Amino acid sequence: MDLNDGPEYAAFREEIRAFLVSREADAPAVRGPNDGKARAWQRLLIERGYAARTIPRQYGGGGREPDILKSRILAEEFARAQVSPGLGGQGISMLVPTLLDVGTEAQRMQFIPPTLSGEMVWCQGYSEPGAGSDLASLRTSAVLDGDHWVINGQKIWTSTAHVADWMFCLVRTEPDAPKHRGISFLLFRMDTPGIEVRPLIDMTMRRNFNEVFFTDVRVPKDQIVGKRGEGWKVANVILKNERDSLGDPNQTLTRLNMLIDIMKSETIDGRRLIDDPLWLDRLMRIQGRVMAMRHNDLRVLSSKLNEGQDSSLARMIVKLQGTELRHELEALAIDAMGEVGLAYGANPYVRDNGGWQYWHMYYLGLIIGGGTSQIQKNIVAERGLGMPREPRAGEA
């Protein structure tokens, strides 16, 4: 089997490489803030068909036909150059595909273009103090009062709530219905009166999470996605996209390339780490897992183009595999830097702005967040492999 690029794809790869060389100065940090430079880069990438590639033009996307190989070439070349592939976040990676799937035409036109361009930043109102792994037991309520929903309750572990313009949120609109029913999916502005955001500082010592309180928050009744009481269906579309984004193989490939650079430059007794059999063995184990993760991603991508192809099991393992792999990859880089790997924060010896230490701690949190690894393993076992269901509390 010939796995080399054909003429069309070889030309596309050269096009990407030439673009990255010519516009290197325009690119923001690989995972930089959503600032003016990042938004300008996003607009350029969309115009070129390199970001939001297959999203229709009327919604602000590139409007290109789906092509798995071109998507893979884009990912490989941006990772090789260690250049930002464009904006991400909960709005772009989670809400946009959900609105394309189950939103109304008016919602697509209103929300997708400014979200793709970075002008509209989103946060996700899902987890609550008593509804984390068992999300369907959420209690935040929304009562219809004339033309508005009136929301009361609390959300927790809400990423980016302190900078978000809008929230997509699960609320209980039918309190007497079974817990997986009676839930609705609402969209609302974060500056709506009655919303209070309080910071939660995690082990990275940054404000990555928040708790959000709602007191008589009034939301127009038409800002609902899907039918009233059927928000759990929408939630599952979101959760599918969330798991995909938390285990992004393209970001992992970029970090692998950066790790290889470190191991080429760091030495022990004058010998490069990458030339030492023990260190090389550790690197190759990580590299093999990255390759497996990327091939699994191809399986997921191909299923979107081939009707009837079942990729459910392939998608179930993405979050579990991706977060654990990133945590171990960042750890290897820290080990490779030796004593400098312990530097963090304002330490004058810190390398790469402390990014390796930050992401090492961040992904330890993500092994828990978005559904713990233990929860993910249950999902894979029960739904993917058909194994017996774990006994629930109170069952005989």
Image: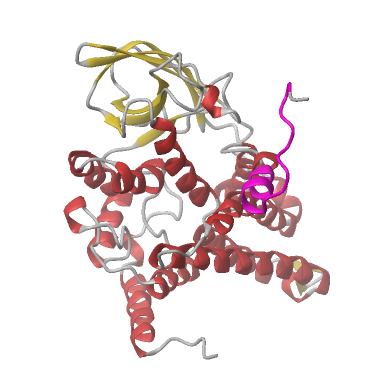
Quick check: 8 above or below 241?
Answer: below
Determine the residue positioned at 32% across, 48% down: 101
What percent of the width, then of the height, locates residue 359?
Answer: 60, 46
Query: Which quarter of the figure is the N terminus placed in?
Result: bottom right
- Specify the segment rendered in magenta: 377-394
What percent of the width, then of the height, locates residue 58?
Answer: 16, 54
What percent of the width, then of the height, locates residue 320?
Answer: 63, 49
* Residue 205 horizontal side relative to residue 271, left or right: left
**Residue 179 in magenta?**
no
Of residues 110 and 33, the one nearer the viewer is 110
* Residue 306 horizontal side relative to residue 108, left or right: right
Of residues 49 and 65, the one nearer the viewer is 65
* Residue 95 horizontal side relative to residue 155, left or right: left
Quick check: 121 above or below 158?
Answer: below
Corner quadrant of residue 293? bottom right
- The residue most toward the front is 396
Corner quadrant of residue 183? top left
**Residue 381 in magenta?**
yes
Whether residue 135 is visible, yes or no, is yes
* Residue 25 horizontal side relative to residue 391, left or right: left
Whether residue 162 is visible, yes or no, is no
Determine the residue positioned at 33% across, 26% down: 228
Quick check: 277 above or below 186?
Answer: below
